[in-house]
Every structure is written in structure tokens, then in C-alpha cells.
């Protein structure tokens, strides 16, 4: 790659509660806005930073206005309300113009200086998508890290895709892929699942995470559980196949119980009282039916959101302000 034609990189940062951390992150990005070369000699430059305001609880709106007025390479995208990290990232990707799109968090864990290494990783193997692969444990509590590992392991085994459990919010995406996904991806689709739909060459670059800056995590355990369930639903129909398998095992189990009961009856070994076994069987099969109906209903809810045209996000032309406190 000639130095006269550096790879243009757009950085997309979803902003939720970053009035304290975002200025520091932007200062770290400033040196990358000048043409330079990566460790492997690939010329690149950060041509724009897209800050997507996702209507968080703090005054990030004022921070965005200040940063966009100070740094010409930064641009604010105002969402009409809070849509979540993945929708906000999509909104930024839709407006990105670079040859590559980098998505990263606002909390300072991910170092912008690693973008050059991720670009080298992509260029060396002609990859379309490169995820950061942390070489150190995430800087969270042991309980959250444990549940995160369990969720990724379950999703990998349940969905039959070992790569799905190695995604990260620090991504380097081909600009064409990013814009295409942002244009066609519907509401309710997990961002990384959508990327796997249209991307064939995926890699993982070793990256060391940093500690979070002065910002509380925006994800409660309930929100993380919601993200995990959304991942399961949008990846494919394998959970529905598991319901079919569960139903088949239930039928076999029911036939075994029926055979045992008939044998006991004809050999006069069955007592008159049978409420305990009856309640047990009814409870088991009722649980199987309710589980199946629940999963199917979740699929129908996702499908209805897409069919009814529910927007993934709506961009506002004016800065969105937090609601006044009562």
C-alpha cells in the first residue's frame, strides 16, 4: 500500500454515559487523524469519528457538542431516544464513509493505538472482519466474568458456531460490509449475528484491554441476560430444533411411563393411590409445553417487529437532551 493512498478509517462510538470518559478517548484518537503507518507498514488515517448519542442518563449531549466544535474530524449523530448499543452502532456504521469501520466503546477499555495492529491483521489475511481478542481477563468482577464465559459457551454449543462466542465490541469491519449491514439489518437482529450472515473471512487479533475510566457500567445483569437471549433468537432456528428434540424425548419418556403403569396394573402391583405420579407427569409435560410455547412466542415477537416495520433507530436533526428529573 502506497503512503499516498492511506486506508481511511471511520471510528464509530456509541455514547450512552460518557461525559467523563469521552474527552480522554478523543484525545487519544487525535494522533491517528494524521497519516501514519501501522507496525507492518500499512498506511492509514482516521478520517472521521462518529459519536452516536444514545440518550443516556448524564449530560453526554453537552460533551458531544463541545467535542464536535473542537475537533473537526468528529461528528455527532443524535438518536431520538435510547435504542441500545447495537442499534446506536448501526446508526454510526450507516453514516461511515471510510474504507474500514472501527467500532469501540466509550469507557476507555479499548486502546485506539491498537487499530494499526488490527488493520495489519486484516490486510495480511484479506479479512473482512477482525475482532479484538483480549489477552487478559475483562476488568470486571469475577461473577460477571464467570457468567459471561458461561453465556458464550452456551451460545457457541447451542448454535453450533464456535466463532460466535469470540465476538467483541472492538471490531475492524470492511467499510462496504458495515454500510451494507446497516442498510439492510432489521430491528431485533443482534449486530454480530448480522455480521456473520454476510461476512466470510473473520479473524481475531490479540489485544490487551485496559481498565475502565471513571464511568459506571451501563449493563446490569438483567440487560446482559437480555442481550444473551437476543443472540440466541436471532442467530437461527436451532433452539426450535431443540424443542423438537425435547418433544421427541418427552414422547419416549411418556411411552416408558405408560408401559410401566400398564405392567403394574396387569400384575396387580399398582396401588389405588396415584396422585403423586400423576402430578409429576403432568408437571413435567406442562413444563415442556410452556417452554416450547415461550420460545415460539419469542420468535414470533421478533418476526412481528420486522414485519410491522419497527425501526431499528431514528436519527434526530437536533441534539437530544435527557429528560428533566422529577
Image (spheres, rainbow, N blue to C red):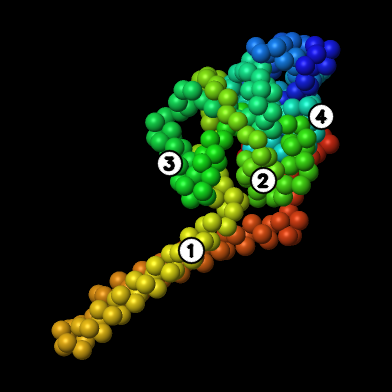
The label nearer to you, 2 versus 3, is: 2
Say which residue label 1 marks. 243
Q: Residue at x 59, y 50 (%)?
A: 235
User: Which is nearer the eye, 185 or 58?
Assistant: 185
Say which residue label 2 marks. 197
Can residue 19 be seen in this snapshot?
no
Pick whichever of labels 4 and 2 is earlier in the sequence.
4
The label nearer to you, 4 versus 2, is: 2
Find residue 156 and report its horizontal and vertical position in percent. 49, 44
Element type at mark 4: loop
Q: Residue at x 63, y 18 (%)?
A: 117
CB within 8 Å, label 3 to label 4: no
CB within 8 Å, label 4 to label 2: no
Find residue 16 and report its horizontal and vertical position in percent. 64, 32
Q: Residue furthest front?
A: 125
Residue 150 bears which disc, if any?
3
Say which residue label 4 marks. 97
User: Which is nearer the eye, 232 or 43?
Assistant: 43
CB within 8 Å, label 2 to label 3: no
In this rendering, the answer to whether 60 lies above or below 221 is above
Q: CA distance from mark 2 to mark 3?
A: 24 Å
Pick whichever of labels 1 and 3 is earlier in the sequence.
3
Image quadrant in which the C terminus is located? top right
Q: Residue at x 35, y 75 (%)?
A: 254
Q: CA distance from mark 3 to mark 4?
A: 37 Å
Image quadrant in which the N terminus is located? top right
Q: CA distance from mark 1 to mark 3?
A: 21 Å
Pick whichever of labels 2 and 1 is earlier in the sequence.
2
Amino acid at each position: 500500500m502506497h503512503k499516498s493512498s492511506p486506508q481511511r478509517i471511520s471510528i464509530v462510538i456509541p455514547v450512552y454515559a460518557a461525559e467523563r470518559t469521552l474527552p480522554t478517548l478523543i484525545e487519544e484518537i487525535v494522533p491517528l487523524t494524521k497519516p501514519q503507518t501501522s507496525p507492518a507498514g500499512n498506511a492509514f488515517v482516521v478520517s472521521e469519528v462518529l459519536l452516536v448519542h444514545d440518550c443516556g442518563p448524564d449530560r453526554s449531549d453537552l460533551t458531544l457538542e463541545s467535542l464536535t466544535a473542537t475537533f473537526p474530524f468528529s461528528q455527532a449523530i443524535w438518536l431520538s431516544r435510547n435504542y441500545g448499543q447495537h442499534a446506536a452502532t448501526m446508526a454510526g456504521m450507516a453514516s461511515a464513509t471510510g474504507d474500514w469501520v472501527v467500532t469501540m466503546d466509550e469507557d476507555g477499555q479499548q486502546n485506539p493505538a491498537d487499530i494499526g495492529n488490527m488493520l495489519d491483521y486484516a490486510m495480511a489475511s484479506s479479512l473482512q472482519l477482525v475482532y479484538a481478542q483480549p489477552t487478559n481477563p475483562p476488568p470486571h468482577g469475577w461473577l460477571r466474568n464467570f457468567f459471561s464465559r458461561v453465556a458464550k459457551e452456551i451460545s457457541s454449543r447451542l448454535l453450533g458456531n464456535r466463532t460466535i462466542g469470540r465476538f467483541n465490541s472492538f471490531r475492524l469491519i470492511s467499510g462496504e460490509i458495515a454500510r451494507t449491514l446497516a442498510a439492510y439489518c432489521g430491528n431485533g437482529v443482534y449486530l454480530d449475528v448480522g455480521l456473520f450472515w454476510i461476512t466470510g473471512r473473520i479473524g481475531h487479533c490479540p489485544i490487551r484491554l485496559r481498565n475502565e475510566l471513571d464511568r459506571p457500567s451501563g449493563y446490569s445483569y438483567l440487560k446482559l441476560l437480555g442481550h444473551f437471549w437476543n443472540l440466541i433468537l436471532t442467530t437461527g432456528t436451532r433452539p426450535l430444533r431443540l424443542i423438537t428434540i425435547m418433544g421427541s424425548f418427552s414422547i419416549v419418556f411418556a411411552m416408558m411411563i405408560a408401559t410401566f403403569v400398564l405392567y403394574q396394573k396387569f400384575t396387580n402391583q399398582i396401588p389405588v393411590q396415584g396422585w403423586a405420579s400423576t402430578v409429576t407427569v403432568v408437571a413435567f409435560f406442562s413444563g415442556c409445553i410452556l417452554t416450547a410455547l415461550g420460545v415460539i412466542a419469542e420468535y414470533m415477537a421478533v418476526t412481528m417487529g420486522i414485519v410491522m416495520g419497527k425501526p431499528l433507530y431514528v436519527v434526530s436533526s437536533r441534539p437530544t437532551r435527557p429528560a428533566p428529573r422529577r
